[in-house]
Image (cartoon, rainbow, N blue to C red):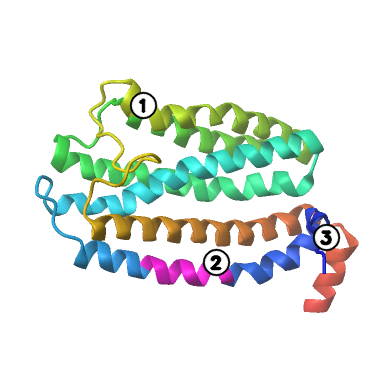
Amino acid sequence: MRINWFKYASPASFYPLAGKMIPWFAIPAGILALIGLYIGFFVAPTDYQQGEAYRIIFIHVPAAWMSMIIYLAMAFWAIIGLIWNSRLSTMMATALAPTGAIFCFLALWTGALWGKPIWGAYWVWDARLTTQLILMFMYLGYIALQASIEDPRRSARASGLLAIVGAFNVPIIYFSVIWWNSLHQAPSVTLTNAPTMPAATASAMFILAIAAWLYTIAMVLKRVRCEILERERHASWVADLAAKEG
């Protein structure tokens, strides 16, 4: 049996599907987060240079990865929304922004806590830190711009353009430690090289990264359902749904 995926581009069709998918991502996210934290804090060995302070990478690195990935996903949905004028695409971009901003803040905060014992300062105007801070401003700007424009179409166009422009900052963040002589350490994990850390440390970090992915998907599905109800509140199917659920 062939599934007509295009029908789920309609908010009315996607709303119930999103509700069914949420537990399939939220529950594994919680389980993997517990496993990853246990390995990271009780199994992974102490770093011979940084001592116990290095364990903040189990929060910091997945949060930093997700802050960049989510912004790219947000820009992707914004492009789809601008080209095809797809309502669901703009809703997806909107739903991604708060989770991305939270991960970005978490990356900056844990980075500051890590920087104090290692660098002797919570903050330095290092290339990686500065570009990550710009990403935080891009998230906040996107959210603020959407909230400031009442007309949904104008709001989607303006915030979509901002998301696309801000996406150019993401590769700069990633390559900043390579392009400039940065205080920030070079990437410990790359697409071409094996991790240079103990197996337990790498395992914990990857498990927590997968948990962050699954958590993000669950949260975006939950938030996009709220967006659908808000923007489609005058549609007949929403009235039928409200009557059915009492």
- Residue 27 part of the magenta segment: yes
Magenta stretch, overall SS: helix
What's the magenta region?
24-33
- Mark number displayed over residue 176: 1
Q: Residues within 10 Å of mark 3 (few under 14, many from 20)?
A: few
Asked whether the residues under the numbered discs 1 and 2 touch, taking CB atoms below 8 Å apart as contact, a structural biologist would say no
Residue type highlighted by circle 1? Ser
SS for tag 2? helix
| Horizontal and vertical percent position of residue 53 | 17, 50
Q: Which residue is mark 3?
A: 4
Q: Is residue 149 visible?
A: no
Does residue 75 appear in this view? yes
Which residue was labeled with disc 2?
25
Front residue of 177 and 19: 177
Q: Label 1 vs label 2: CA separation?
A: 33 Å
In the displayed structure, would residue 213 be above or below residue 189? below
**Residue beneath the point at 34% across and 41% down:** 108
The circle on residue 67 is: none
Q: Quadrant of the C terminus?
A: bottom right
Compare residues 121 and 144 and report the one nearer the observer: 121
